Image: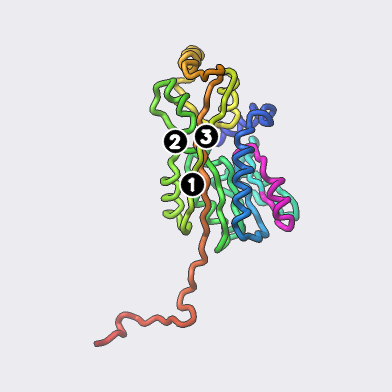
Amino acid sequence: MSTLSQLQQHINRWQPHAEKATFLTKEIGTRLIERLDLIKLKPTIILDASNIFHHQTKELLQRYSDATILTATINPNIINPTSLWQRWQRQGKNIIADFHHLPLPDESVDFVFSNCLLYSSWNLPTLIQEWYRVLKPNGLLLFSSLGPDTLKELRASQQSRFNPFIDMHDIGDMLLHRGFSDPVMDMEMLTVYYQNFKQLLHDVRVNSIPVMPVNYRGKLYLQQLEQAYKTLLTDDNKLPVTCEIIYGHAWKIQKPAKNSAGEFAIPINKIKR
């Protein structure tokens, strides 16, 4: 089964539980949107390429009331996502597609907003390249993700080196390699406390966060993992969950036209001493 198919099944299974379990991604999204206060931007077309449970589309519409919001959504019944194109309307509109291969023309979007999607990507370079492709010159990419220290207590409890989260410096390097200009990255640490391990693991799963290799997901292993995690109980009997939150933005800079005003080309064979 492909990773896309797995995510499609995930949506069907966890959608009823999303409202309560995705409180952290909602909070991260709110903090991400607040960063727009410092950025001068008047977009006409916005792509909301966020995690599988979108929360900030309404806030984006409120902030940019004259813009069209395109929300990339995975449809479990999709057959050929790259062939689909939906008409743009003046309000929010879903695009049914694999977010690595969007059915959008080149340079058709002014602003790409992505909250907590990167860690669900199975091909991050392709995803970043797709964002660059659909952005217009001088367009903005604003995103958030989770860094390597996220869930460090859970990984320590299972004594595993498995870590699906990418360092912000590596993300910055990918942005530069794909053509984005001067990416700005920063992070903050948040700690969430849970009353019980079952609820903790439930919320992690709903948010589609990979926590361990597939061969470690047996029932007995999870019971042992729970016992190991309980050694981390705080004084008030709560389980800590560390989250490294990464924020970043970058611009797709307009490339100068060839032979622009004040410039001219001379064939090398015409240059003489």
6 relative to 64, above or below: above
Tag 3 secondary structure: helix
Q: CA distance from mark 3 to mark 1?
A: 29 Å
**Local crowd size for mark 1, using a 10 Å CA cut-off: few (<14), some (14–19), many (≥20):** few
**Local crowd size for mark 3, using a 10 Å CA cut-off: few (<14), some (14–19), many (≥20):** few
Q: CA distance from mark 2 to mark 1?
A: 13 Å
Q: Nearer the viewer, mark 2 or mark 1?
A: 1
Frontmost residue, 24 versus 76 = 24
Amino acid type at mark 3: Thr
Amino acid type at mark 2: Pro
Frontmost residue, 13 versus 149 = 149
With 98 as the anchor, is 172 left or right in this view? Answer: left
Question: Which residue is labeled 3 in the image?
Answer: 3
Which residue shows up at 74% across the image and 55% down it? 65
* Label tally: 3
Tag on residue 186? 1
11 relative to 128, above or below: above
Q: Earlier in the sequence, mark 2 or mark 1?
A: 2
Query: Which residues, given as a range, are shown in magenta?
Result: 51-70
Tag 1 secondary structure: strand
Residue 182 seen in the current view: yes
Q: CA distance from mark 3 to mark 2?
A: 21 Å
Question: Which residue is labeled 2 in the image?
Answer: 148
With 262 as the anchor, is 30 left or right in this view? Answer: right
**Local crowd size for mark 2, using a 10 Å CA cut-off: few (<14), some (14–19), many (≥20):** some
Frontmost residue, 38 versus 77 = 38
Which residue shows up at 69% across the image and 31% down it? 19
Which image quadrant: the C terminus? bottom left
Amino acid type at mark 1: Asp
Q: Position of residue 270 (x, y in %)?
A: 31, 85
Tag 2 secondary structure: loop
Q: Any magenta on residue 54?
A: yes
